């Protein structure tokens, strides 16, 4: 005769399964990116050139000299990059919730955009200053936010790339990760530390400045997410920061002396 599991046993099993689920999601997305960034940084450290003389290109051409094929590849990778968000949405529905529980929706568009613009203005300038200082000191690679050819679709693709990055990172590393860690019984400070370290880790390929700057940004985003209860303002902030960085670099590289270029 079999007996049904007791309530504590069922709760513990659910908790373990959610932990495994979290590891799978991160292993298919930004956790894997963190490991890749670590390997890339180790390779950069062993190069004969110092870090400031090496280049990290963020949005490079995928079919040089073939702009239409390049465009197709760019759109493919942008779409593929959003699949972990689709997976998270599906898992939340299986849980009996949805992405709305993370505040990922359009219910409060104007307020979310206004808050995001304010955060972007506050963080964007300080982030640029940190990058320039760390790059000049030799602790950071020269980051080239755009390596796309000067064709009609360059700016739209850079904007789409910025929003894809923002949606992926804030849904997975902010909303979903903090929710799952809370369900695992993690304290708030420990969850903030985990989210911030993860965010910094997949930027390590840029150098120490990329690691530290994004860890600080991650901690700030966690605090704002806890205050507002919505990821959308942080998605907007992240997208605006990346849009300015990507498009600004494409337009200014080689035309201003203060911007490091390859």
Image (spheres, grey):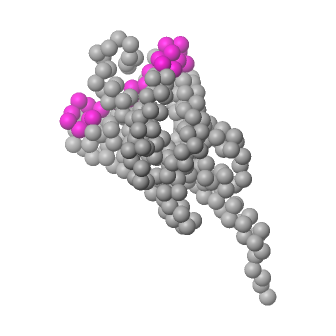
Task: Out of 126 and 160, give the one closest to the viewer.
Answer: 126
- Quadrant of the image containing the C terminus: top left
Question: Is residue 73 rendered to the left or right of residue 108?
Answer: left
Q: Quadrant of residue 147?
A: top left
125 vs 35, left or right, is left
Q: Which residue range is magenta in the image? A: 129-155
Is residue 26 inside the magenta stretch?
no
Q: Answer whether residue 83 is visible to the viewer in this image.
A: no
Residue 39 image point, x, y percent: 56, 34
Q: 56 or 251: which is nearer to us? A: 251
**Quadrant holding the N terminus:** bottom right
> Is 177 displayed left or right of 248 in the figure?
right
Question: Which residue occupies 30% across, 40% down?
Answer: 157
Q: Is residue 140 magenta?
A: yes
Left or right position of 58 against 52: left
- x then y, percent, for residue 207: 53, 25
Residues 60 and 189: in front is 189
Q: Residue at x 46, y 52 (%)?
A: 104
Above/below status of 100 relative to 51 = below
Q: Which residue is depicted at the point 41% across and 54% down?
A: 107
Residue 15: image quadrant is: bottom right
Looking at the picture, how far across and down is residue 112, in whole percent?
43, 44
Where residue 134 appears, as percent x and y from the top left, is: 53, 18
For the point 43% across and 28% down, the residue is 121
């Amino acid at each position: 005769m079999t007996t049904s599991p007791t309530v504590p046993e069922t709760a513990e099993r659910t908790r373990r399964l959610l932990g495994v689920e979290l590891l799978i999601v991160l292993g298919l997305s930004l956790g894997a990116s963190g490991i890749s960034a670590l390997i890339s940084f180790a390779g950069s450290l062993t190069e004969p050139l110092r870090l400031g003389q090496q280049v990290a290109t963020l949005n490079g051409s995928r079919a040089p000299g073939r702009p239409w094929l390049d465009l197709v590849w760019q759109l493919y990778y942008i779409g593929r990059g959003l699949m972990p968000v689709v997976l998270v949405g599906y898992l939340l529905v299986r849980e009996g919730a949805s992405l709305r529980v993370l505040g990922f929706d359009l219910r409060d568009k104007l307020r979310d955009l206004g808050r995001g613009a304010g955060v972007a203005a506050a963080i964007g300038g300080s982030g640029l200053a940190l990058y320039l200082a760390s790059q000049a000191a030799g602790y950071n690679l020269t980051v080239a936010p755009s390596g796309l050819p000067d064709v009609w679709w360059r700016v739209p693709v850079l904007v789409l790339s910025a929003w894809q990055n923002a949606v992926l990172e804030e849904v997975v590393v902010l909303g979903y990760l903090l929710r799952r860690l809370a369900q695992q019984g993690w304290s708030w400070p420990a969850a903030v530390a985990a989210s911030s370290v993860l965010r910094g880790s997949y930027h390590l390929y840029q150098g120490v400045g990329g690691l530290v700057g994004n860890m600080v940004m991650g901690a700030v985003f966690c605090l704002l997410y806890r205050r507002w209860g919505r990821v959308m303002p942080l998605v907007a902030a992240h997208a605006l920061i990346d849009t300015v960085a990507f498009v600004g670099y494409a337009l200014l590289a080689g035309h201003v002396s203060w911007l490091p270029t390859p």
